[in-house]
Amino acid sequence: MTVCADRCIAVRLSDWCACGDRHGKATLLDLDARDFARLAPLSRGIVDVSVELGTIVLPATDTEVPDLWHWLEVVR
């Protein structure tokens, strides 16, 4: 997937959540510190981003695509 703030980075989605409200902002993704630092200084804590989903490759144990589009609509 591609995550963009002031710049865009490619990240591998290994976990996702409807993380809920953080300081008045709905959150969808919780990037690890290394990936977040590629977008903004860690001291910012939260940044507005846009997300573009690429091809979703499911592990052998999963049978359907997670409803990520629903969560993207929630944070709009």
Image (tube, grey):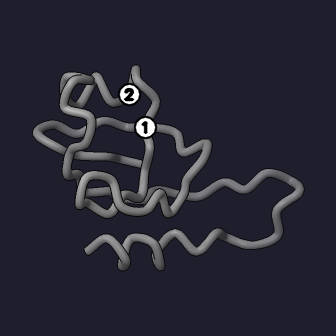
* Residue 7 in picture, x, y percent from top left: 15, 37
Residues at circles 2 and 1 in contact by the CB criterion of under 8 Å: yes
| Residue situated furthest right in the rendering | 61
Give residue 35's mark: 2
- Coordinates of residue 72 in the picture (x, y in percent): 38, 71
56 is higher (above) or lower (below) than 30: below
Three-letter residue code for mark 2: Asp
Instruction: Give the x, y percent position of residue 69.
Output: 46, 75
Which quadrant is the C terminus positioned in? Answer: bottom left
Say which element carries label 2.
helix
Indicate whether 76 appears above or below 44. Answer: below
Are there few (<14), some (14-19), or many (20+) residues within 10 Å of tag 2? some
Tell me the residue at 52%/39% (across/down): 12
Quadrant housing residue 73: bottom left
Left or right: 51 with respect to 13? Answer: left
Q: CA distance from mark 2 to mark 1?
A: 6 Å
Count of numbered circles in the view: 2
Any mark on residue 72, and which?
Answer: none
Residue carrying label 1: 31
